[in-house]
Amino acid sequence: MASYSDFKYFTVNSPAPFVAHVEINRPTKLNAFIEAMWLELRQVFNRLSTDPEVRAVVLSGTGERAFSAGLDVTEAASENGVLSGADKLDGARKAAKLRRHIAEFQECISAVEKCEKPVICVLHGISIGLAIDIATCADVRFCTKETRFAVKEVDIGLAADIGSLARLPKVVGNLSWVKDVCLTARDFGAAEALTVGFVSQVHESKAAALAAAVKTASLIASKSPVAVQGTKEVLNHSRDHSVEENLRYVGVWNSAALQTTDLTAALLSGIQKKKPTFEKL
Amino acid sequence: MASYSDFKYFTVNSPAPFVAHVEINRPTKLNAFIEAMWLELRQVFNRLSTDPEVRAVVLSGTGERAFSAGLDVTEAASENGVLSGADKLDGARKAAKLRRHIAEFQECISAVEKCEKPVICVLHGISIGLAIDIATCADVRFCTKETRFAVKEVDIGLAADIGSLARLPKVVGNLSWVKDVCLTARDFGAAEALTVGFVSQVHESKAAALAAAVKTASLIASKSPVAVQGTKEVLNHSRDHSVEENLRYVGVWNSAALQTTDLTAALLSGIQKKKPTFEKL
Amino acid sequence: MASYSDFKYFTVNSPAPFVAHVEINRPTKLNAFIEAMWLELRQVFNRLSTDPEVRAVVLSGTGERAFSAGLDVTEAASENGVLSGADKLDGARKAAKLRRHIAEFQECISAVEKCEKPVICVLHGISIGLAIDIATCADVRFCTKETRFAVKEVDIGLAADIGSLARLPKVVGNLSWVKDVCLTARDFGAAEALTVGFVSQVHESKAAALAAAVKTASLIASKSPVAVQGTKEVLNHSRDHSVEENLRYVGVWNSAALQTTDLTAALLSGIQKKKPTFEKL
Amino acid sequence: MASYSDFKYFTVNSPAPFVAHVEINRPTKLNAFIEAMWLELRQVFNRLSTDPEVRAVVLSGTGERAFSAGLDVTEAASENGVLSGADKLDGARKAAKLRRHIAEFQECISAVEKCEKPVICVLHGISIGLAIDIATCADVRFCTKETRFAVKEVDIGLAADIGSLARLPKVVGNLSWVKDVCLTARDFGAAEALTVGFVSQVHESKAAALAAAVKTASLIASKSPVAVQGTKEVLNHSRDHSVEENLRYVGVWNSAALQTTDLTAALLSGIQKKKPTFEKL
Amino acid sequence: MASYSDFKYFTVNSPAPFVAHVEINRPTKLNAFIEAMWLELRQVFNRLSTDPEVRAVVLSGTGERAFSAGLDVTEAASENGVLSGADKLDGARKAAKLRRHIAEFQECISAVEKCEKPVICVLHGISIGLAIDIATCADVRFCTKETRFAVKEVDIGLAADIGSLARLPKVVGNLSWVKDVCLTARDFGAAEALTVGFVSQVHESKAAALAAAVKTASLIASKSPVAVQGTKEVLNHSRDHSVEENLRYVGVWNSAALQTTDLTAALLSGIQKKKPTFEKL
Amino acid sequence: MASYSDFKYFTVNSPAPFVAHVEINRPTKLNAFIEAMWLELRQVFNRLSTDPEVRAVVLSGTGERAFSAGLDVTEAASENGVLSGADKLDGARKAAKLRRHIAEFQECISAVEKCEKPVICVLHGISIGLAIDIATCADVRFCTKETRFAVKEVDIGLAADIGSLARLPKVVGNLSWVKDVCLTARDFGAAEALTVGFVSQVHESKAAALAAAVKTASLIASKSPVAVQGTKEVLNHSRDHSVEENLRYVGVWNSAALQTTDLTAALLSGIQKKKPTFEKL
């Protein structure tokens, strides 16, 4: 695995072959985000995206108390912070400054989605605001019995602009519920998250959820990386395109992807009942 | 609140601060719709949309028996009615007349969706046909244990063209079920509606459902109207656009919306643990 | 009903008025597909699409053991098979050959979706790989308690390119689950399929599931075919378009469709409480 | 023709059978627009759209000096005017007010495009700012040798938001030129307008241009209104959709439109070499 | 070259290496189309699309008088013809029949566009109605000084539904002109066609135009077929998609296409100043 | 102006207030591009995009002989070059590597389009291949009498994947011509470029073209930067979206942009006939 020791707010290790575990690491502040953190988040996931030693990623927070308490509001509202309104610009110039800022913030969070390797997000403890934005970028979401979720943005006076409103209606199939939680900013728990499909597994503890995530990640990592990374790409394309468009796209995609030795390796391993080995990707 | 006493088929009152309660008011006919009613519906919701005293809307039917029995078929099939086929026009000219009529009908119903304030729909008793079209325009849907639903249009010989087919696949996440109920016109009840996510709460009685709706509406009305109305707009945009498009849109939207005093008011109220006050919108 | 006796791998009969039952017929190979079969599948559904004696279709596999075990991998990997890599072409030319092949394969499977009459798919026994691609083209999905599902493609080294990745995210409302099963190729059963909305009914046995499917198909077949076929078309359009686009489309569609005698027949039958008769379509 | 005498700022008469001529009528102010005018414009074109006595429309300004000098800036900048910044709202609330205002303004101008009958715009004299927005909504554009055009908005400090930027890149095929004139606000004349395809005919005088427009309008008005209005609708759809989408749309459109007696009338008139008569639409 | 001698209404020969010349062959009727012809047209171009001996196609009419006079109206209006209104179906059922018919007709004409090899269309003599639909499917259009064009459909009472309205606004950059010729059905000549960009070359005679077309086709046929066919595909995709979408698509496309030996062959030929040879495609 | 002295292959200076002139600076190789150059190009334009001292940009090549001869093919074909095929990866893994490479290359070139300030491109001398990709990202294109253009990519065996095929059909209105030059890779000159609208001005010499470009850039730089940058953004959005979508977008955009003091400054300067001063942006 590439080196990830140069990050201040993220730790990365490998709990299983070809699996990386990323931890948000600011536990004294409930893993709340300051700007330096989302800038680092982008770097971490861009590096994982092309790291040939990584085939699946697990993402969690450090400590038991929180995956993340979201945006560090105190920091954001301080001078030069993202929610600071201190400058003397007119409305249009303030807007330009805000637009540039939001665009960069979005790009950092979207790095989780754009990572070519599947990402399994383990939500535990407090998981609100920005935690939801990040979780909707992941491919698979697990949580613990005790996780407390909230799409918190309206409580600080704003419409969530880093991805929750863009992605939540596409990851769960109950728009009445999506609007309820986004418009009221109310808390919801694991059971509700499971029922509506925001998470697909609930576990007894953070340890159990992490173990399950590493197990699923290992299973994914044991498959052809050509097949897995193609599947992630095509599913993300599918979410945003018509069936017709997606069929055309996957046809072109697979015209190259099928030219892989993984196909033979996978077919043979099926016949020979032994575990296939795949080249790096 | 603006005056809404000029409507014949709708009553509007305010059960809580900044909350409007709209009732469909033709109980002797199970609140079935004639043309005058959908023309009024548009006016009611257009007025609510910019009424600064309103921050959330609850919609129900008058009386216990029905939210609405849908289109008043007898009226529609009578001379000059929308389903009347009496004229002598050729097929193309009939089509032009029908197209204009459908377009206006759609626009009236869509006014519920276009209303800038969130709408919580309380479905009770008979809720069929046009009732479903209207309910899918609302943001949040509650019902009672006894509510009887049906996407009834195929039973009168037509494909639903006022919005159910356009919106239902986007508000629930079970297309097999959507097609089942749309193709068979069969009844379904509260439990089924909850399981598939058509409603997000089921209550014992109309009174209980209404109380819950007013409570949720009050909660929404207590938040920053800038944040709430932005959230509704961006979620509706999200439903119909790719993640990429929606991120661009919300970035531009928030470049103005973040220039609000609500942000400070909301942040301060969080710190001071007291209820914020927001300017009108 | 038109004659369907010219097919080698499919049997078609009529268990009820206006209902066709199609069976995949290669039980000795668990109904696994070779190329000749998907070419026939297209022909079968194209013929059903305009057969005036057919108003609803039920699709199942022959025998108890499998709806279908998917692609016949042995055949596909043999010389001249779809997964064979034997030729000496350069990468671009191989890609062109693969692209043409995938496009035709997709078109064959999509014939199930494009069939103008609703299709109810009964999944029983082994239902993996290509079985899922086909099932997502159907309108309604039922299964039995014992059905074993898997989106199997990554296990043979490829991203599913015949439709599962394009359609699955649009038929169920739990993207975390979709990605889980597509990335791991793991098995799942009836209960899981029902919870996420992949199927809308689970039955005790294949016989019971088939009986239920025929009953639903008969109910659909008893309705106005103008209304039913319009509803299928508009719902499929809705899946791939914005609400605005779909409202425009259904307005134009119904400007012709409302010029049907079915409307009067349906309305009269409602008043007279007797079963309507509709002209062929 | 319906009565159009109730408008203050527009005169409508009929220079030829089935042809309406609309004149912008505020010559003392170079036909510059105040809010009352665009509200009237919407009403005029909505009425023309379904007036069975009208099959084609010619649009010009009253007097020789100007088609229109665009927005009446003095009025717009005055108290309560659209460009007035007098109120005390915060940035988000100002934005909401502006958004509602722009949306209504756009809807008024778009009424020219949405009019079901073809509109030929005769641009003469000063034709700047709002004049370009309106002209791009028309179907065909003619001008005189002396017409002076400018996309003037950047000169008053804003990006054109009523339609020029949305439509101009779609009506001419030279994006380098479009950006040049939109970014510099510079004047351009008839020759340049013809070369880039903004207008399709240039005439010696307003009288000559009007005569040519009436002649073309008369020619259009002599054709089947079913064919003409369908052609306008499908071409406007085509501008904003892919070829695939448009082919699907026109197929559905014509499934009703071909059921017209105009088809026989037109075919017979071709054979019999005499002028066909068509029913009203 | 594959055999094309089984067609009744089309002749195909090879005037130069890797170039096919297709002629519409019903000169006694000005090459007007009956149904059998568009069914054959699809077959011809589908075969050319994958014929490894063909790298570019020239399309013209047989004889001097006409490329094609369009739809054979007499035939179309006769019993069982496409414009016949003889049956007793209700409006909705007639519409279904028409829809199916139009869809197949469109698919036949679109085969010219979908042909993987570039098509150069030589328009000569009478080139009206269906001739325009076909020509807009071609990649490059040449004509002679004497060619007479018309988008003729409104003159027979219908909106052109086989492709002219879908494609014309996308092949020329003057929407005012497009609407003029589509709404009036008026004739236009070579000079006008050249000015607006409907054709890109005008020649003295059919022979000269054909010679120029064969020369251009030969030039195209001398290039890497991987590069040429990719360029056609990506340009057609570009017409119907945003820049962002197209960049993503071409990236995936070229990830396979760049794995060609043509790249080296082309580079070497550039250095060695000799003509490269490319493998079949 | 920010400092731009840290670039090796680009020089940036300011020939007029608020105008930057960027020169591609590798004249000994006809300004042909190696990878280091497109990486720098991105940095240069990203910096210009938010440089408050810059309101318009002129882009040209250093020296008389070439704007740019495109990709440095020798370099690209060498070991580790972008067209090198030396590695031993299977087809799918090569494809992944190529895809990543193309995506980054595209992003570098697109930086010219994404620059918030208008870019005027002066094409002179040899302007082929990558020169066209870059030029289509600019807003306005000028050239000299002697400029030689070619969309050269098919001559090196590939479909242009850095933007020419994506953007060219949208900047000129003659698709027959676009396909001709893209499929044949033939040269074309200034007159042809002007006729089809690829450039909007042709000048006698590079010096004259540069002077004209600086003059236009100065004119743009004298306008409200809020208005100018909004106009660029909205026109680029318009190119890729429907009219409806663009109207919605510009409404939201201007809800912030109209809150600028530039509006008053511009209006006053119009009344007072003096040059307005605008705040930085």
Image (cartoon, coloured by chain):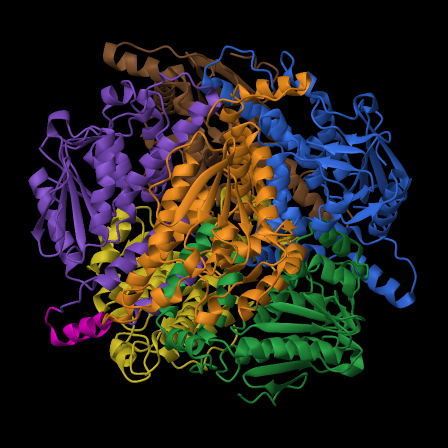
Chain colours: A orange, B green, C blue, D yellow, E brown, F purple
Tell me residue B20's x, y (percent): 59, 82
In the image, F224: left or right of E153?
A: left
Residue E97 vertical position relative to residue E139 in the rendered view, above or below = below
Tell me residue F236's x, y (percent): 33, 51
Residue A6 vertical position relative to residue E227 in the rendered view, above or below = below
Q: Is residue F13 magenta?
A: no
Q: Is residue F273 magenta?
A: yes
Rendered image quadrant of residue A105 = bottom left
Magenta: predominant secondary structure element? helix
Q: Is residue A228 visible?
A: yes
In front: D133, or D227? Answer: D133
In the image, D21: left or right of D233?
A: left
Span highlighted in magenta in the image: F260-275
In the image, A211: left or right of A114?
A: right
In the image, A161: left or right of A58?
A: left
At x 65%, y 60%, the residue is: A192
At x 62%, y 87%, the residue is: B13
At x 26%, y 78%, the residue is: D29
